[in-house]
Image: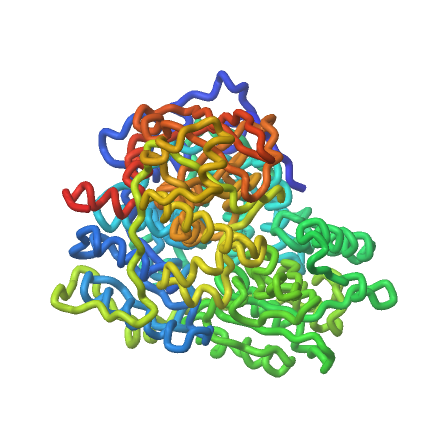
């Protein structure tokens, strides 16, 4: 069972005790693990209640590092000040675009040489496994340009952000944020046989995501149940904390963590971390591991949690619910027929995948092999793929006989690659239902294209139940419902040899004379304008879905191959959710181009007249596109979700709330105003409607938190109050400059 306690708790003699809010002292909050780690990394003199963090190391993959290095290089980068790892795990197999992927990898290696970085060649390790193996350490902090930067089970606070935040670190600036609240996750009991880490993670997401219980907070795992979990199990839960919308996570450490670092040849990285006596937490989640059972996260979010038992009992009800959701979200443009997968009242699925930073861990695959080895899979339509997370883990699987058992059972082993998690590998057939031990199951993240009439669905499950389903001929079943003997614990090992032979270790050994190697697809950023005195915003997308993911704002999968070409990549923006968006932005950008040359179209003159304005104000006005979404930015940290809008002429996002801190930061760093509106404010406007925001530059300079705007809709005008809460001085400067690159250029005294 999972129980939520919204009131503060204090650790008294090693156990949490509820407190009244007024009893929660600041000194008690200083005794949490999270607080001690954050304070140790925050710059001296930082105001109370704020953070100015410098991270111990940085890590990126090949969707993000080119843009980061280009931006930092143009802003004065001379050398990497901390270990910066460039992994190649996202576009190492996708062949779209010819030489694009290999060109970017060549750029990455040249950058590692020039600036003193660490370069992990393609298919050697997925980003987060390498960080666990080589960067983690108790009390350390790692910043990654990937949202699943989570290493809390190893006592390491990982934060996933958009690339501009890594640029700041490379240039000696800090990661700035309010001191977050800390939520205690108190673990008791031990998981039953057949229940794996994804079951715990899905149950946790289901309990806390939709109610914002942990949004932008830190989860701190402690309690007697921690000791019952092997390291792979802890890691599997921890990486999924991203899907709760929390900011970061950290766990108490013990002898299992100490053994992990000893096995990995880094015993000095261990130290004991535990909540101090009297530590105060802002809220608590109680999780009794012994009550867990196999879970499924229904399409299209990890928080759509249901037990496999309930799903098997009423499959038709749940499948019809998903079909209705598709109908609502896509307005009948594309449909799903999941109820066709019912055979005699049982649910038959099409595909299974166990992959990457969440699923491909040794223990998960060993348990899957134990389930499959006595049964096999049969030769029906159901197929199973497994992707280990690193070459050292793959060697363990080979030497321990796990790989042999999986292959003999009919599974297919594939390289260390993140592709199945974001739609660049094992893309299911149209109308298929795939069960996956991966991190996300957002709409079309698995690679389908609704605009082309394609749509498939992913249901998240643990490796154990995926293997059980495979052994059951593709008919859904939980691992707790089949008879199998879990593998006996083995002495884990770690062979660093492949890294020593193939990884380029250049930290503190920069070679400034090295020239960056550019491929034909690596294109500089276009000129980004500063914020004008007035803004005329044209709505180019209005989305009333409860949540809009970054994968909808800029699709992942094969489009990621163009990540180093801002203009080409921008042509895919919102293509799988609002296919008309790019064309509308082009019309707005053309209007702005003509305005800047003093050529006012008849449509613009008419709009100004309807707004009650003289065309003379247009000389101090910029025309930009804007999107409205109820809650944008859930999911990936990729800054392209914001930068693509900016490249197309975007000037603002308007929403009721941002789904994550990282997406709001991406909007700010790309110079887009992060407007919100109050929950009670209606927004019944449509693409093509105009929003006049007078004096916006002066308002931002003053630090105004409220701005009055005027909307033109169907020839009529209405007042609209736009909010800019929590704007820091640095954020205001960045937006005024037009984007982070411009801000750095101004600091250097150039434009």
The answer to whether residue 263 is visible is: no
Relative height, residue 345 to residue 167 (above, below): below
Q: Is residue 574 above or below residue 678?
A: below
Q: Residue furthest top?
A: 22
Front-lying residue, 195 or 530: 530
Q: Is residue 82 visible in the rendered structure shown here?
A: yes
Q: In the figure, is residue 28 to the left or right of 269?
A: right
**Residue ID at (70%, 66%):** 431
Quarter occupied by residue 484? bottom right
Residue at the extreme left: 513
For image coordinates 40% across by 41% down, the residue present is: 623
Q: Position of residue 451 (x, y in %)?
A: 61, 62
In this figure, which colouring scheme has been used for the structure?
rainbow
Residue at figure coordinates x 62%, y 51% from the top left: 301
Residue lying furthest right in this view?
Answer: 344
Q: Is residue 313 left or right of residue 59?
A: right
Q: Residue furthest front?
A: 602
Q: Position of residue 478 (x, y in %)?
A: 72, 61
Q: Position of residue 455 (x, y in %)?
A: 66, 63
Q: Height in image: 97 above or below 57?
A: below
Q: Which image quarter: residue 244? A: top right
- Out of 553 and 435, give the one closest to the viewer: 553
């Amino acid at each position: 069972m999972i129980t939520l306690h919204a009131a503060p708790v204090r650790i008294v003699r090693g156990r949490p005790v509820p407190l009244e809010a007024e009893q929660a002292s600041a000194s008690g909050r200083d005794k949490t693990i999270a607080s001690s780690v954050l304070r140790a990394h925050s710059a001296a003199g930082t105001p109370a209640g704020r953070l100015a963090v410098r991270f111990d190391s940085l890590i990126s993959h090949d969707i993000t590092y080119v843009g980061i290095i280009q931006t930092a290089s143009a802003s004065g980068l001379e050398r990497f000040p901390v270990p910066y790892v460039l992994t190649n795990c996202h576009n190492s197999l996708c062949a779209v675009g010819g030489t694009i992927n290999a060109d970017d990898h060549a750029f990455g290696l040249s950058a590692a040489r020039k600036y003193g970085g660490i370069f992990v060649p393609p298919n050697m390790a997925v980003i987060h496994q390498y960080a666990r193996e080589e960067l983690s350490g108790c009390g350390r902090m790692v910043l990654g340009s990937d949202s699943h930067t989570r290493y809390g089970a190893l006592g390491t606070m990982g934060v996933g952000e958009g690339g501009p935040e890594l640029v700041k670190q490379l240039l000696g600036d800090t990661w700035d944020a309010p001191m977050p609240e800390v939520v205690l996750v108190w673990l008791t009991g031990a998981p039953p046989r057949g229940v794996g880490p994804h079951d715990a993670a899905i149950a946790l997401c289901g309990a806390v995501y939709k109610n914002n219980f942990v949004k932008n907070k830190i989860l701190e795992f402690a309690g007697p149940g921690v000791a019952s979990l092997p390291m792979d199990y802890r890691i599997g839960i921890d990486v999924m904390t991203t899907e709760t919308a929390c900011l970061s996570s950290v766990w108490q450490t013990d002898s299992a963590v100490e053994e992990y670092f000893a096995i990995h040849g880094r015993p000095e990285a261990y130290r004991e971390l535990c909540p101090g006596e009297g530590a105060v937490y802002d809220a608590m989640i109680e999780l009794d591991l012994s009550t867990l059972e196999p879970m499924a996260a229904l399409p299209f979010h990890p928080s759509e949690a249901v037990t496999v038992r309930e799903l098997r009992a009423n499959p038709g009800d749940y499948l019809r619910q998903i079909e209705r959701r598709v109908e609502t979200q896509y307005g009948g443009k594309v449909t799903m027929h999941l109820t066709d997968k019912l055979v005699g009242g049982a649910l038959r699925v099409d595909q299974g995948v166990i992959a990457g930073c969440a699923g491909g861990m040794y223990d998960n695959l060993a348990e899957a092999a134990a389930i499959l080895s006595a049964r096999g899979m049969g030769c029906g339509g159901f197929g199973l793929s497994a992707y280990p997370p690193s070459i050292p883990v793959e060697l363990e699987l080979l030497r321990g006989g796990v790989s042999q058992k999986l292959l003999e059972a009919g599974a297919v082993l594939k390289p260390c690659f993140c592709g199945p998690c974001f739609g660049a590998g094992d893309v299911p057939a149209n109308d298929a239902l795939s069960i996956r031990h991966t991190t996300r199951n957002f709409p079309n993240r698995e690679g389908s294209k609704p605009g082309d009439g394609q749509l498939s669905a992913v249901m998240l499950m643990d490796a154990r139940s995926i293997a059980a389903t495979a052994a059951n001929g593709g008919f859904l079943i939980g691992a707790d419902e089949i008879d199998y003997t879990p593998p006996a614990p083995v002495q884990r090992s770690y062979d660093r040899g492949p890294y020593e032979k193939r990884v380029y270790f250049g930290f503190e050994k920069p070679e400034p004379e090295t020239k960056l190697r550019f491929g034909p697809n690596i294109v500089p950023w276009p000129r980004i304008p500063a914020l004008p005195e007035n803004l005329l915003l044209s709505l180019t997308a209005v989305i009333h879905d409860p949540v809009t993911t970054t994968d909808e704002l800029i699709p992942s999968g094969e489009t990621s191959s163009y990540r180093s070409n801002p203009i080409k990549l921008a042509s895919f923006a919102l293509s799988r959710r609002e296919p008309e968006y790019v064309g509308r932005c082009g019309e707005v950008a053309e209007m702005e181009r003509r305005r800047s040359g003093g050529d006012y179209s008849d449509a613009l003159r008419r709009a100004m007249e309807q707004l009650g304005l003289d065309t003379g104000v247009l000389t101090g006005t910029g025309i930009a596109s804007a999107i409205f979404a109820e809650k944008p930015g859930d999911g990936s940290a990729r800054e392209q979700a914001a930068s693509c809008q900016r490249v197309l002429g975007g000037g603002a996002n308007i929403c009721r709330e941002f789904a994550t801190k990282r997406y709001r930061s991406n909007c700010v760093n790309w110079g887009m105003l992060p407007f919100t509106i109050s929950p009670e404010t209606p927004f019944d406007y449509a693409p093509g409607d105009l929003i006049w925001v007078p004096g916006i530059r002066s308002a931002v300079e003053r630090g105004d938190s409220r701005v009055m705007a005027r909307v033109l809709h169907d020839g009529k005008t209405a007042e609209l109050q736009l909010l800019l809460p929590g704007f820091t001085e640095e954020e205001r400067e960045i937006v005024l400059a037009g984007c982070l690159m411009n801000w750095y250029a101004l600091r250097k005294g150039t434009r």
